[in-house]
Amino acid sequence: MEQENIDYYKELQKHLDKMPVGYPATESGIEIKILKHLFTPEQAQIGLELNFMADPLKKIFRRLKKSGISLEELEDKLDEMYFNGLINRGIVKEGETDTKYYGSAPFVVGMFEYQLNRLTPEFFKDAHQYIQETFFNEEYNSTGVPQLRVIPLNKTVDYEQSIAQYDDLKGLIENIGEPIAIMECICRKGADLIGEPCTKTKIRESCLSFRSGAKSFIEKGLAREISKEEALKFLEKAEEDGLVLQPGNSQRPMSICTCCGCCCGVLTSHTQLSEFAHLFATNYRARVDTELCVGCGTCEDRCNVDAVQVEDDVAVVDKDRCIGCGVCVPTCTSEAMSLIKKEEETLPPINTLATYSKIMDKKAELARAEKTQI
């Protein structure tokens, strides 16, 4: 493909920033450094012609026809980009033929996680810096519609509280759809690479994906298929180690992450704030029975977000920091800790597409409000 005098990386950054979950620029330019690590100039040029909603190959070819690339060459290049974790791809059976659809992938959750088998210490450090300093502050929390939500550990909720299916871990796994796949956590793998291993767990295969998401990860060699029974057994171990369950923010999520406060980009970026509970999609919070509490400190040690402290021999929960994960409940030595349902329940979008549509609608609303103020 002919290269014009265009900075395709800067143009690609601007293009990706228009997606439901954007890719904002920084003063340091580290976002461009990341793109140069991931994309060749030619791949960046192709990426400019992709939309968040995937388009069929022939439609993308028409946009690039003037470049002189053939349909077959374009398909090969797009497939290479897909297997390198730069874009998304779907295959739809239309009659007797399979039609490939290609679309842009967000940086998180997306291109970053797709680099699992291509991860280097330098890339992880750059990506972690970008995520911590810019992405979560300027993008992830900008609309009030997070990509992930928090659900309680399986044995921590009093079922008399009428737990909804989308908050019921066992119910989710039973009805989530197959295949189910498990893969390494890129946050913990990256922490290992830079010599800062997880202090919470020795588990490394700790991210679950489902249905088409699982098929994609398996196809790219990033994950392996497991059964529902294996998934539930793994989640019991995650509960034992005190990990936070963060599925995609929908009633039928495509993934569930099991996160720790020392490695997870979502948790570590928020714990730098004094108050952040309102930024999480969660329907529960922890409560202490002060009559039963013996001030052993187990809950304080287990909490991944520093929401519990022992004061005057009694555990105290900071409501502005508690995300309702339930990690503090099962190991409470005096059964003083419990989860209670919030008065106002947060209903997650029906599916992943609805989540991103809601994010995009909110971004448009905020943009209109900003123009009005100007």
Image (cartoon, helix red, strand yellow):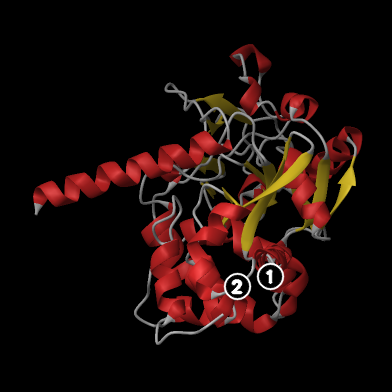
Amino acid residing under circle 2: Ile
Amino acid residing under circle 1: Glu
Is any atom of residue 281 visible in this view? no
- Residue 118 in picture, x, y percent from top left: 74, 74
Q: CA distance from mark 2 to mark 1?
A: 6 Å
Q: Which mark is residue 95?
A: none
At label 1, counting other C-alpha atoms closer than 10 Å, the crowd grade (few under 14, some 14-19, many 20 or more) is few
- Please state, as top left, top right, bottom left or bottom right, where the C terminus lies in the image: bottom left
> Mark 1 highlights which residue?
73
Residue at horizontal 52%, vertical 59%? Answer: 62
Residue at horizontal 49%, vertical 54%? Answer: 51
Is any atom of residue 175 visible in this view? yes
**Where 173 sits versus 119, above or below?**
above
Residue at the extreme left: 374
Horizontal side of 359 relative to 92 (left or right) equals: left
Residue at the extreme bottom: 5
> Is the C-beta separation of discs 2 and 1 under 8 Å?
yes
**Nearer to us in this view, 4 or 362:** 4
Q: Secondary structure at mark 2?
A: loop
**Where 79 sits versus 94, above or below?**
below
Q: Which mark is residue 69?
A: 2
Q: Secondary structure at mark 1?
A: helix
- Residue 58 in picture, x, y percent from top left: 60, 54
**Nearer to us in this view, 72 or 251:** 72
At label 2, counting other C-alpha atoms closer than 10 Å, the crowd grade (few under 14, some 14-19, many 20 or more) is some
- Residue 227 in picture, x, y percent from top left: 90, 37
